[in-house]
Amino acid sequence: MNQEQLKQSAGVLALTRVRNQTIDGLPEEFRPSDEAEAYAVQEQLHSLLDEAGYGKRVGYKIGCTTPVMQQYLGIGNPCAGGVFNTSTNYIATSAQFQNFSRPGVECEIAAFVGDDLHPAIDGSPFTRESVAPAVQALFGAIEIVDDRWTEYKRVDTPTLVADDFFASGIVLSKPKPAKEAPDLSKAIGQMTVNGKKVGEGSTGEILGHPYEALAWLANSLAARGKHLKAGEVVMLGSVVETHWVMPGDEVSVEIEGVGGALVKFV
């Protein structure tokens, strides 16, 4: 794709996001052919959404970091999208159901990045161990996803990535200092809807350890000439399968030893 096609692709996605419309997919001439083009479109999308007053990107979400989500979506590798200031909430909140195309929820652990993560001068990749010191705090979190497609299973992965991979909003628990966190290779997370448990999983299923997902994102950004910055929040992946919600549903999540959050769809 040339620069004009990248802009056109991002423009279609921005318009449908702002208007809260569903689409079949991108026109073929504006469809990214691989993930490199997808992230280039995504960057243009973030700029357009900022200009439109939708919000500023303040972090990232990482999808498909656990077997349950890779199997559910049929995608075998992690994918990243943007998190915006206007859709970042804390502890407990309400969400207007009509503001989504088809909202769903996931139970996640999130990290607050306290220091810039610049790539190493020698080009060595980030590892779980090298990113850990930059994590200042952790959160139990709800990711609110939105299926903005007529039939998402027919949409190719690069297009899903270009559109932020279903990202729509987050609800974070009180921050837990990272040094006080439990063993993240086995902390249990669970999600309830209207008081009934609908899913449970271990944070160790996130690539073996949530910090492996953070390292993946740091390396992905480095490959694109970017880096994680101090103050950014990163959603590290869902430990349960996506649950699609209805008006009136009250959703809560809890990550053992980290914290919980709640959202009600009204």
Image (tube, helix red, strand yellow):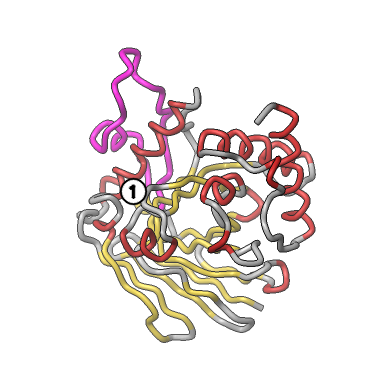
User: Viewed as shown, does residue 102 lie left or right of 209?
Assistant: right
Query: Is 224 rendered above or below residue 28?
Result: above
User: Viewed as shown, does residue 183 lie left or right of 17?
Assistant: left
Q: Position of residue 42 (x, y in %)?
A: 61, 40
Query: Is 253 rendered above or below residue 89?
Result: below
Of all residues shown, which one is farthest toward the front?
A: 28
Identify which amino acid the numbered label 1 is placed on.
Answer: Pro
- Image point (40%, 47%), residue name: 78
Q: Which residues are magenta?
A: 110-137
Quarter occupied by the C terminus: bottom right
Name the residue that disc number 1 marks.
177
Q: Rate crowding at label 1 as few (under 14), some (14 to 19) or many (20 or more) other CA atoms within 10 Å.
A: some
Q: Position of residue 56 (x, y in %)?
A: 66, 42
Query: Is 211 rendered above or below residue 188?
Result: above
Q: Nearer the viewer, residue 40 or 29?
A: 29
- Image point (29%, 38%), residue name: 132
- Image point (50%, 40%), residue name: 232
Q: Nearer the viewer, residue 117 or 78?
A: 78
